[in-house]
Every structure is written in structure tokens, then in C-alpha cells.
Image (cartoon, rainbow, N blue to C red):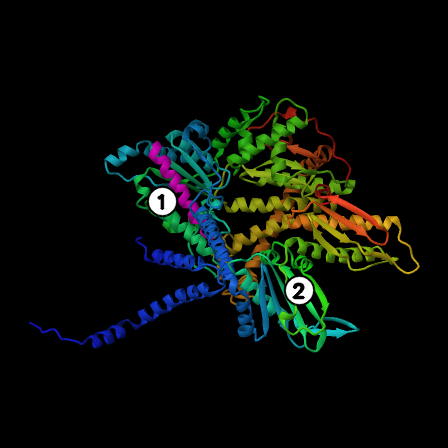
Amino acid sequence: MVAKRQRSWLQRIALFFEMHWVKMLVIFVLVLSIVWPIMTFAKIDSYQRTYLHALMSTMIIQSIIYGGIFVAMLFWLHYGGGSFSKIAKGRVRGDQVNVKWDEVIGMEEAKQEAWEVVELLRDHAKVDLIGGKVLRGVLLVGPPGCGKTYLAKAIATESALPFISVSGSEFIEVFVGTGPARVRKIFKKAQQFARVEGGCLVFIDELDAVGTSRTSDLGFGAQTERNNTVNELLVQMDGLESQKYNIVVIGATNAGEEVLDQALLRPGRLDRKIYVDRPGLEDREKLYRFYLGKIKIDPAIDVARLARRTVWKSAADIENIVKESALIATRNKREMVTFKDLSDALDRIELGFKRKRRMNEEERRRIAYHEAGHIVVTYLLHPTDDVFKASIISRRDALGVVYHQPREELFTSSRTRILANIKAALGGFVAEKLKFESTSDGVAADFRNAMLQAHQMVWRLGMGVNGYVGDYEALLSSWAFRSSSAGDRLSDRTKEHLNEETHQILSQCAKDVEQLLRQEDALLERFAQELLKREELEYDDIEAVFVEFGKQRIFPAAPSPSILPPPTPPAAT
Amino acid sequence: MSRVPWLDALIGVGFSVLVAGCDGPSYRKEHIPEAIQRICAEDYHLQVSAKRVGKTVAAHLTHAGVLAQQDGQIRLSPTANETLGNVLEAIHRVVLSSDDPNGFYLLLVSDPSIPGVYLTLMRYLDDVRRVHANSITPTEFFSRTILNLQPADPPLINLNQVTVRDVTLEQFLSWQLAKRLQDRLAERLQREGPSQVTVGPCAGSFTNGEFAFTLNVLPKEGATLSAEVIDQVFQEATTVIAQVLSAYRFEQFQSVRLTHPSTGRNLLLPRQQLDIFR
């Protein structure tokens, strides 16, 4: 047994002071700082004391009021229903969205994938029962105007769940903490709806505005705020609380997946990706039929040709074309939309408004021959493109235009196609040279186009004939604002050879075009005269001339030659 | 006891402040003169004698350099502000913190170097309270102060040399109004251009519920006093009296009599009629 050491009370006090002198000092100072003012306060004259008393009472009440207001504002800012954390969009019930599955057209593949999502949402309870993985998020990726929002609405309608729609940019605010607060608020709301209605869809449009990769801040705090918003989104999507409810986040973005934070794309979050691409030929036809079905149209409209002419156009573009054509028809006091209205609408959207410039006859002739050269070369040499329109009416900065497009979506370009592009671009230059023995500055844009393509062929695509295979641009230093060739891993000799070959391609193309146009002089002359006379030629008009000259192509089917008036003799040049 | 110690401490401090603030008046009314003298002596090293008559406290300060003679006129010296301010501060502290903080105070200021005169300063304590609470402006406060230069023969060296009477509010208002009338009429007539009249001291008194004021407006030598000017003088005087009495909320009077001695014009205004001018 250890004997306890006995200490005297003095020793105990000394030990206590030694151990606790800092605490005691603090307490002493604290007590003194309270007692001293009170004593002083008690000593001052009663009139002053009463005055101070009244003042202090008012100050305490004021402080409580101001403090209360401040705290309330902070709460309001971060958690409450204040405008900072408030989300503008309200909740919509699934049946109120009312976008039926059949109305979603022009994205058959995306629809098939989206249908699985709908089924998973509907069978949420069954999936839970068998212990399967519940769907948490869907990412809709694709170009703008292709119907991502529309598809999301259709999912909501079909699954009959409440639908909360927000834009990614709504999370970005000038006040710190607003972004995460809004995320919390949305998910809280979604949880409430999910509790009552068995599930909820949260649709975040333009997800890239909020869900980009987290990076370090440059010192201004904006990136930190963005990172916090992403973090909150991640937590809410995969948090313990959220897992209790059937909440599915549908994100839509035009930006690629690589832009988004990788954590957002991991399993359990936006792991199911649906690509909503631009509509193909058949989808475009369906879209045209759908939108044209809403307005009065000329029954003779060739929808298939419209679809061919609008390669790479999105569903929104097609809707816009139809709306614009209705406006044009109304302006022209017609009761129904014709093919011409649709064509004009497309021109207006693609090429801009027509500008009636006053030009002298010589200039008009030059432009007409220039455009005629483009028509003849494109039609006769281009393997994939159709000439849909030719015009010598000014639009934007162009004095004339020949509008040609591939008949269907092409994702690659062959050497033949690129060469045809170059020749088509040079058609105007050669035509001017042949007819006027001099050329104008109107060829600048064509030359730029042709040279860039020839350069790409040789420098990057191995399409030259002198054995240079490889992407030689990869060997060039790629510093922005580079003013010299320092850093290049390509010899000047090689560069010279490559450039020489580029020029060879261009000159050979020019020779081929010249040979063709000399051979087809009558066609060239005829198109120039038609353009001078009518200023614009549509697909059928162009096709009819070629048919008349026996040069029509097998595809597409030749229109009736009766569309065009009988040929007129070429005007004197 | 609440579970939060700091809340207990905060409540304790608040309660202590409350208790400390709820103490009674600092000075008994019987000890007001001694308190004023003590504060002046201890805090400001000034010799002040004081006495209390009814609700009026009188204090006398004799201090070299308080008054100055300039261009044949005697006025407060530029260095007197601090000294007078200290004495007034002491009087305010004591009287307002006493158990009878209503009434008036009178400060007599004499300068041994200018023995023939002394300055009197009279104030109503309610005015002091109002200016402290920003209820009236300092300019208005100064207008409510009655300042007079009195001849002293023999020189005033002790408060016992003068007879201090208890001042009533009616008397104070009549003196204040007389002074105000003189200032306002002089200012008004001067504002309207080179005048043919002069404004002398206006006497004021209160007897049997009636305020009586003498409007001492006289024509300059060789000039005459037009009826129009007399009308203006009466109208201005009536307005001033109505406004001041209204500001004091003073209604214990029956009428106001205005007399213009040189023309013998006399105006008697019942209290109800005076309300029109407020």
C-alpha cells in the first residue's frame, strides 16, 4: 500500500496557484472588467446614470433587433426561402409536364435507352425488393437543340413522377455559399416530393455550368465556390439521406463528358449516359412531318428533299425553319406554306437576309459566271453533295452563293471528296478567268477554303502523291502567339516539299476545273444567263438544266424538265 | 439556473447594471450648494459660492479674466468659455441629479479686474434637460438663456451682497420673452433694409395672469414711425410670444398685453386669440 504524502494547506494553495494561475488570472481580469465598470457606473451622478441606463437599454434592444435581422438574413440566405437560395423553377407533376413518348421524335436510339430509365423508375420497388441497384442519375449528352429537355420531360411524363427543372447556371451566384445552398434546397424539395409521390426527377439543364471538374482556386474564390457546389451535388446525389428516396437526377449538357467532374460520372451518380445526337435523314423526315403537321402546307411539298437538304440540322433548327416559313407565307399573304417558303426560311437561317445591293451590269455578270462555275463543277464532279440553291443576291458579306450539301450525314471525307471540294471552290475563279480573262477579289474566300483543304490533305492526311505520309503539323511547335519557327521539329526542306505538293494539288485541281468548264461552256453560259435573269435558282431549276443538257445524275431522281422555262440564248458578254 | 453558464453570467451582469442604475438621486436638495462648491473646487479648482432659494439655485463665480472690456463695451472674454463651461457643468450635474431637479439656476459672474459690473445667466432646468436629449437645438437653448450685464456698486465679491429670489416660470418667461422680442424686432427691422427706427430694451412682466410687454421701438432723430411699421412690430411680437409660450406648453395665463410707449398703442390679446399665431 502506497502511503499518501501529506501536504500543508500552504503547500496546497501554492500548488493550486502554480497549476491554475493562468485560469485564475483570466477569471480575475474577467471579474474585474465586469465589476469595475459596474462600480464606476454606480458612482456617477444619478442624472448621467439614468441617461446611460436608458441609452444602454435602447442599445441592448437595438442590438437584439439588428442581430436578429442579421441572423435571419443569414438563415434566409443559406437555408430559407430567400431569393438567394430560391430556385426560380417550380415543381411540376409528371402528368402536368405532359410530353407523351410518341411526341418525342427524331431520336430513336436515345428513346430506346431512355425507355429503360422509365421502366427502372416505374419498377423502383421491385428493384429494391430483389436488392438491385437503384438508378440514381442519367446524363443526356448531345448538341444543342436536339431534344434533351424534351426527352427528360417525356421520361417524367411516362414515369408519372414530379419533375424539378433547374438550369446549371442557377447555382452560380455572386454570394458565397449560395450554390451549395441551392443544391441542398432542391434535393430537400425532391425528398419531400419523393416521400409523398414515390419518387422525383431532378433535371439539371446545362450541367456543365455547375458540374465542371474541380480545380484549385486562383485566389479569387470563384473556383472554391464552384468546387463546393460540385461537392454538395455529389453528396446529395450519393449521400446517405438521398439513398432512402427514389430521386433520379437527369443532367443535360452540350459539353463533352470530359468537361464534367469525373466523380459526377462514377457509378451511383450520373452513370447512365444517353447520347441525344442530331437527327438522321429518317428522323429529320419525321420531324418535318411532325412540325409541318401543325401548320397549313402545300400538299406538294417534298418532305424527303427537305430532310436531305437539312443535313446536320437539329430538331430545334427544323422547328425554327418551319416557324420561319410560316412567317414568310403570312408576310406574302398566302394561306399555306409552300416549298419555296421553306427554302427561303432555310436560306434566311443559313445564309442571312437578302440585301438588295445596286450593282452595275458588269459586276452582276461577273458574279453570275462565278456562281455558275461553282454550280457546274460541284454538280458534275462532287461525289457526295447536291447543289440545292444558287443565288446572286447578296447575303451578309457574300455577293452570291451556291449552296451545296451532302445528301446524307457523312462522318468521314475521302480524298475524292476533298478534291471535289477544292475543285468546287475553284470553279468560280476559273469561270471568271475563262469568261473575263481576269479574276476579281470575290475569289478570296474560295481560295482560302481550297488552300486549307489542300494543306490538310498534304500536311495532315497523307493524301499527297509524293510519299509524305503522316501528320506533319504535329511536329510544329504549337505555342500561341508564336512568331517564328523556333521549336519546330520539321526541316525547312520538308516544309518546302509539303507546300510544293499543296500547290501542285491546287494547280492540278484548277487545271481539271478549267478543262471541265471549257468542255461544258454551254452549261456555264446557260447557268450564268439563268442567274442573271432570275437571280436565284432552286434545286429543281438546277436539276432541270442539267437534264436538258443530258448531264443529270442518277441520284436523286430527275425532276420534270417542264419546271423551267425554255432556254434563252446566252446574253452577249 | 440555466444549463448555459455564460448565459447565467450575462444575466448576472445585466442585473447588476440594473441594480446599480436604480440607485436614488445623488444629491439631496439641502446639499446642492455645498455639492456645487465642492465639485468646482475639487474638479476645476474654481472658487464658487452657491445658495438655494426655493427652486432657484444661485451660484457666484469671481474669476480674473472672465470679462473683457473692448470698445467701451464689457463682454465675456474669449478665454471665459472653458471656465464658465466648467461651472455650468458642475451646476447641471448637481441640480439635475438632485431629488428636486425642477426650477432655475442663476449664475453670477464677476471679474475683479472689471469691478463695476457683473454678468447674470439664468436658465430653466427643463431647458437643460431638453438640450441634453436633443429635444431642442443649441441655438434655441441659447435663446432661452437670459444673459444680462448688471452694474455693481460696490463690486460684487460675495453672493451675500445680492438678494436672490425664487424665480417662477411666469417670471422667467416674461424676462425671456422681453429679451427675445428685442432681438427679433431688431433683427427683423434690420433685415428689411436701412431702417428709420431703433429698438431699445423691451420690458416684460407677469401680473395676475397677464403677460405685459413694452415694445420699445422708436423713430430715429428726425424720422417718423409709420403705422405700417407699428403693425409689423405688433404682428412680429405676437408671433414670437405665441410660439415661445406654445413651445413651453405654458397655458397658465389669461392674456398678453403689448404696449408701444411712444404711440401709446396698446394691444390686449386673450389666450385663445393667441393660438391663431402659433
Type of amino acid under label 1: Met
Place of residue B155 in the rendered image (x, y in percent of width and height, measured from the top left):
69, 74
Asked whether B168 or A503 is in front, the reply is: B168
Asked whether B268 or A447 is in front, the reply is: B268
Q: Residue at 60% across / 39% down in the picture?
A: A350
Task: Kindly identify which residue carries mark 1.
Answer: A237
Q: Give the label on residue B186, or none.
A: none
Quadrant where the C terminus of chain B sits is top right
Q: Write down the quadrant of residue A8 in the picture.
A: bottom left
Type of amino acid under label 2: Leu
Task: Kindly identify which residue carries mark 2.
Answer: B121
Q: Is residue A185 magenta?
A: yes
Q: Write down the quadrant of residue B85 in the picture.
A: bottom right
Residue A467 visible: no
| Disc 1: host chain | A
**Magenta segment, which residues?**
A176-197
Q: Is residue A523 magenta?
A: no
How many tags in the picture?
2
Where A485 falls versus A467 (above or below)? below
Place of residue A491 in the rendered image (x, y in percent of width and height, measured from the top left):
52, 66
| Disc 2: host chain | B
Q: Main secondary structure of the magenta part?
A: helix
Asked whether B123 or B1 is in front, the reply is: B123
Q: Do discs 2 and 1 share a chain? A: no
Residue A335 visible: yes
Q: Residue at 60% across / 22% down in the picture?
A: A298
Q: Which of the two discs, 2 and 1, sits closer to the camera? A: 2
* Relative horizontal placement of residue B237, taking residue A41 as reference (left or right): right
Q: Mark 2: which secondary structure?
A: strand
